[in-house]
Image (spheres, helix red, strand yellow):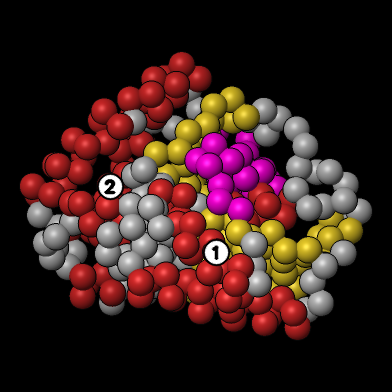
Amino acid sequence: MRKAVIDMGTNTFHLLVADTRASGYEVLFKTNVPVKLGQGRINENLLIPEAMQRGIDALINFAAIIKSYDVTEVVATATSAVRSAENGRVFVARAKAEAGITIRVLSGDEEAEFIYRGVRLAGAISGTSLIMDIGGGSVEFILCTREQLIWKKSYDLGAARLMQRFFHSDPLSAEERVAMQAHFVPQLHELVAVCREHRPETLIGSAGAFETFAQLLAEEQGTSLDLAEIATADIDIPAYRTLAGRLQQASHAERAGMKGMIPLRVDMIVVASLLTDYVLEQVNPGNLRLSTFDLKMGVLSTLLPNNSHKN
């Protein structure tokens, strides 16, 4: 059976086409578009017209690709930007009318559940782990083992939200850094308490910013890292901390010139690194690992005929 998964994130829309069979799956096609759906007024819970149109245009293009692959089932999910927007229903209606795509708007809990399934499919989980997925609108945390999801929560602390609220200088000012760090303390109180109880050994970063961290570190070390060919990769924590410090002190132009940096994340990587720093400091895991599998792969896992998505 041929399936398509569309993941409509706050920053990026993803399309995945795969053949599914009892023995597993084969990815036939993958693409992503930097739609920036949350641009402008995400903290006011509004999708601006230009961003909404970019989203619709991307979905029309995805629909044509899906048709060319003779897909039998399409699952399209939307996350923080759409679920929190007052005009999110307008976007959902337009997607159906103009692109023929029916959108399922995920709750934060559902989003976290799919992320867990995707990371588990990658084989990234060993021992007690904390999964962290930094999106544009929200960040999901999942405390888990390979066999069990222990705790999960979605927070409105996505990179686009943090940027629009705190990041207005170039480079980031000390005052902005302190304000952002202070914002994390009450917001993530429950996360810290749960992790102090369960003591996860590994922090697993799900795709997104963590792919960029891994790419930047690989470029620094003169090694190659083909994200399309790997499901997981370990990240050296001291090397990451040094990189994070440089990212936070660099100007926009300096970050844009770093080998391995993609344009979409030139600024968002700064707030993502501050959030990651805070979690590393509070949780103190022994290991940091990248999973290139994320929400869309979690959705795909639920479409496999061998029911591999079940606990």
Residue 35 drawn above or below residue 281: below
Q: Which residue is mark 2?
A: 274
Residue 222 drawn above or below residue 149: below
- At mark 2, the secondary structure is helix
**Residue type beneath disc 2:** Leu
- Tell me where residue 94 appears, x and y as whole percent: 53, 69
Q: Nearer the viewer, residue 137 or 54?
A: 54
3D distance between C-alphas at marks 2 and 1: 36 Å
Which comes sooner in the sequence, label 2 or label 1? 1
Residue occupying image coordinates x 33% and y 67%: 48
Q: Quadrant of the C terminus?
A: top right
Whether residue 270 can be seen here: no
- At mark 1, the secondary structure is helix
Side (left or right) of 236 relative to 204: left
- Tell me where residue 1 appears, x and y as whole percent: 87, 64
Instruction: Single out the residue that lies furthest toward the right.
Output: 22
Q: Nearer the viewer, residue 83 or 161?
A: 83
Whether residue 36 can be seen here: yes
**Residue type beneath disc 1:** Ala
Q: Which residue is mark 1?
A: 93
Residue occupying image coordinates x 62% and y 29%: 149
Residue occupying image coordinates x 13% and y 65%: 170
Side (left or right) of 62 relative to 162: right
Q: Which mark is residue 21?
A: none
Instruction: Point out the stretch of residues depicted in magenta.
Output: 104-129
- Tell me where residue 124 appears, x and y as whole percent: 62, 45
Residue 304 drawn above or below residue 68: above
Is-magenta flag for residue 11?
Answer: no
Tell me if mark 1 has few (under 14), some (14-19) or many (20+) residues whose alpha carbon lies within 10 angstroms of its own: some
Is-magenta flag for residue 120?
Answer: yes
Please report contact status of discs 2 and 1: CB closer than 8 Å, yes or no: no
Residue occupying image coordinates x 34% and y 44%: 157
